[in-house]
Image: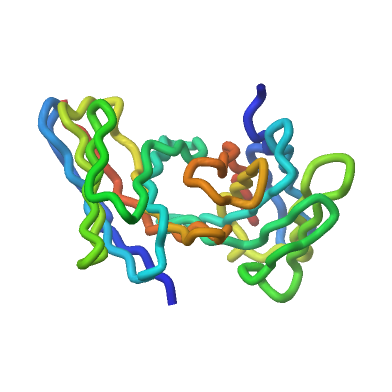
Amino acid sequence: NAGVMQNPRHLVRRRGQEARLRCSPMKGHSHVYWYRQLPEEGLKFMVYLQKENIIDESGMPKERFSAEFPKEGPSILRIQQVVRGDSAAYFCASSPDRVTSSDTQYFGPGTRLTVL
Amino acid sequence: GEDVEQSLFLSVREGDSSVINCTYTDSSSTYLYWYKQEPGAGLQLLTYIFSNMDMKQDQRLTVLLNKKDKHLSLRIADTQTGDSAIYFCAESSLGGFKTIFGAGTRLFVKA
């Protein structure tokens, strides 16, 4: 059973371009979480999605950021008109159900976004 | 609001014990975790403890929880160079989905 997959692993964008980050959850998992890790900091929650639904996006910046988890295909985190401050590692995690026990959120390897 | 704090750096000699400390503020925290992150990699769940426990041991890892002081520690016995990594303390509440992370403690193991 493959783990959580994220691609690309590294992404370089110029200011003003769009960044699309993909996350394929573990097989059988229907819940996806996105976190952002700024340099020298811990992970900050961004958004929690189930298939076709955004459950909580309280950690998402109000502008330029959006996320989706369609019925088919990976979850996508989209950043429009990127700025240098968006440079970070973006981690996806998945779980088989809403987290009700301690160890059911599995993390992917992350996408490291660099904005030039 | 919820907050998790931990010291940023720890340096130990190979073979010694490492103790990484963490404090948290959310009194409704139910699960407390330790994650390990190696350079360029994702997070690996090392161990966790329920808030109604005081201690949990798993091979070289010992987690101690002082719920009154909201203090969590991770002890690594016989620290090896392969243990060099960033260790994140994190907490979540029962039924919650947000895991709150500390900034991470960078453990350096000297041979």
In the current view of this chain or complex, which residue is farthest to the top? A1
Residue found at x 78% / y 50% = A76
Q: Which image quadrant for residue B85?
A: top left
- A17 or A28: which is nearer to us? A28
Q: Using the image, determine if residue A41 lies above or below residue A73.
A: below
Q: Quarter of the image containing the C terminus of chain B?
A: top left
Residue found at x 29% / y 34% = B84
Q: Using the image, determine if residue A44 lies above or below residue B59.
A: below
Residue found at x 29% / y 46% = B106
Q: Is residue B12 visible?
A: yes
Position in image of residue B66 (x %, y %): 21, 58
Q: Quarter of the image containing the N terminus of chain B?
A: bottom left
Residue found at x 65% / y 35% = A4
Give the colour scheme of this rendering. Answer: rainbow
- A64 or B75: which is nearer to us? B75
Position in image of residue A21 (x %, y %): 73, 47
Q: Which image quadrant for residue B86?
A: top left
Total residue callouts? 0
Position in image of residue A32 (x %, y %): 69, 49
Q: Is residue A16 visible?
A: no
Position of residue B1 in the picture relative to residue A53 (left or right): left
Position of residue B95 in the picture relative to residue B79 (left or right): right
In the current view of this chain or complex, which residue is farthest to the right? A72
Q: Using the image, determine if residue A34 lies above or below residue A1.
A: below
Position of residue A3 in the picture relative to residue B59 (left or right): right
Position in image of residue B90 (x %, y %): 40, 54
Q: Using the image, determine if residue A42 lies above or below residue A72.
A: below
